[in-house]
């Protein structure tokens, strides 16, 4: 059975978008490495890059141009300097050239083309890279697709590969059956599978680094101030929220009475860091990056959950649920709308929190289902193409939905009428039916009804 490494749903990278920033950076680096592998790098004097569909529509607002320059230079989302990436495109234009793995290539504005009205057959987020020599002869051309969550595919490169894992599953029904048969939790099943794929030491290191990055992002965001990048002039507010909440705690209200407000502040903190292009964890996308960290941090601050539990039971349970969305539907806003991003993250967080609260496997599945059921049909309509409005606030609301889903599930015995598999398939179908205007193109909804000034 073809399997996804569930922990690949969590990657440390930069904002503002997993599919429009992280994915293009990785694609550009892949093209640069291909030129090097074909011994064509030193002959290359000019590049041409075309961004199709959703990438063409909102690439500028999502920092795609900057990410491409960084990727061509060999940078990766995990290790790049976010500050330098923020100005990579204008800096390269000013210089008149850019680095491709250390080799200087001429660069002009017209070398990057935004083809928003053309959709490549495989996916809305398509990219065509072409390299030319001094005579104008094409040396190499490659097409890549940013398919959501920072994942990149080529025309012939499958995302999923055959893996020899102890507990292969492709549906929630199969996952629950494995848990019952083997007397294992969802986290234990996930751990066994990813250990088989990459080894126990790598799994522990990944989980620890991902959770620590989530904590760091929240705490950086709570200290942030000023305006977010772009002409919308959106003011950062997580820091102000934290100041006001601390003041209220010093008065007549206790911290326990303000848990919902703190939960929202945590989510907004992450998504403001993301919108600013800073270091975040793709979980499972950048547009929804605040939900899983916020719910986990909420459990840490108000439920007495340890970092070790969060880095293991929480993230592993969430990853298992996320892998079902990735395998059977989509986590791409360009493909499924925001239900694929915020909806999936909300479902993952609800499942993880239910596991932390001692929920049964059935209650975990129920919480995941409840969370997505009430995100069905959610559109992706970022104003100006920036991952700011309504994205930042939407993460705060979805974090609350995840906690509410856990509370509902924990009040039941896990039995329910609508299964997680059913709601995932419904999300897939809804994404297919949804107009392209509401799938990250900024051609409908709030994106056209909000005055951009």
Image: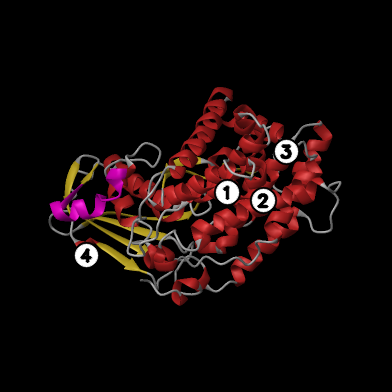
Q: Which residue does the numbered mark 1 point to in the structure image?
A: 291
Residue where numbered disc 4 is placed: 110
Query: Image quarter for residue 441?
Result: bottom left
Q: Is disc 2 placed on a helix, strand or loop? A: helix
Across and down, in percent, residue 393 comes to 53, 58
| Residue 402, numbered circle | 2
Image quarter of residue 316: top right
* Cα gap from disc 4 to disc 3, whole angstroms: 52 Å
The residue to which callout 3 is attached is: 355
Q: Given contact means CB atoms under 8 Å apart, are the residues at marks 2 and 1 in contact?
A: yes
Nearest the eye: 44 or 150: 150
- Label located before the other in sequence (2 or 4): 4
Residue 136, above or below 286 = below
Q: Earlier in the sequence, mark 3 or mark 2?
A: 3
- Residue at left 40%, top 38%? 78
Q: Is residue 318 magenta?
A: no
User: Residue 102 has which mark?
Assistant: none
In front: 187, or 194? Answer: 187
Give the residue displayed 52% in from the left and 26% down from the top. 205
Element at label 3: helix
């Amino acid at each position: 059975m073809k399997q996804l490494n569930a922990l690949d749903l969590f990657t440390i990278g930069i904002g503002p978008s997993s599919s429009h920033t992280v994915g293009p950076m990785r694609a550009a680096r892949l093209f640069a490495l291909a030129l090097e592998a074909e011994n064509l790098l030193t002959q290359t004097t000019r590049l041409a890059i075309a961004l199709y569909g959703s990438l063409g529509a909102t690439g500028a607002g999502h920092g795609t141009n900057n990410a491409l320059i960084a990727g061509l230079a060999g940078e990766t989302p995990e290790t790049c300097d976010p500050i330098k990436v923020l100005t990579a495109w204008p800096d390269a234009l000013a210089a008149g050239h850019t680095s491709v793995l250390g080799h200087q290539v001429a660069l002009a504005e017209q070398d990057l083309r935004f083809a928003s009205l053309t959709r490549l057959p495989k996916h809305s987020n398509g990219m065509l890279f072409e390299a030319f020599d001094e005579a104008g002869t094409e040396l190499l051309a490659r097409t890549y697709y940013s398919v959501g969550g920072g994942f990149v595919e080529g025309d012939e490169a499958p995302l999923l590969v055959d893996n020899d894992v102890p507990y292969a599953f492709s549906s929630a029904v199969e996952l629950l059956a494995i848990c019952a048969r083997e007397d294992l939790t969802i986290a234990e099943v996930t751990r066994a599978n990813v250990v088989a794929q990459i080894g126990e030491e790598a799994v522990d290191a990944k989980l620890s680094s991902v959770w620590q990055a989530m904590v760091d992002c929240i705490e950086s965001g709570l200290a942030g101030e000023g305006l977010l990048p772009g002409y919308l002039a959106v003011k950062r507010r997580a820091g102000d929220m934290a100041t006001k909440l601390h003041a209220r705690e010093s008065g007549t209200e206790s911290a326990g009475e303000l848990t919902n407000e703190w939960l929202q502040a945590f989510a907004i903190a992450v998504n403001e860091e993301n919108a600013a292009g800073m270091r975040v964890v793709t979980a499972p996308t950048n547009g929804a990056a605040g939900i899983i960290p916020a719910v986990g941090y909420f459990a840490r601050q108000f439920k007495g959950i340890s970092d070790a539990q969060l880095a293991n039971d929480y993230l592993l349970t969430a990853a298992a649920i996320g892998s079902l969305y990735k395998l059977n539907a989509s986590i791409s806003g360009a493909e499924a709308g925001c239900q694929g991003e915020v909806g999936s993250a909300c479902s993952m967080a609800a499942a993880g929190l239910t596991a932390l609260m001692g929920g049964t496997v059935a209650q975990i599945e129920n919480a995941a289902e409840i969370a997505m059921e009430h995100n069905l049909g959610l559109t992706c309509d970022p104003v100006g193409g920036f991952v700011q409005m309504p994205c930042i606030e939407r993460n705060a609301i979805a974090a609350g939905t995840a906690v509410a889903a856990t509370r509902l599930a924990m009040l039941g015995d896990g039995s329910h009428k609508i299964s997680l598999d059913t709601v995932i398939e419904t999300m897939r179908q809804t994404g297919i039916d949804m107009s392209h205007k509401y799938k990250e193109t900024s051609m409908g909804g709030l994106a056209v009804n909000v005055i951009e000034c």
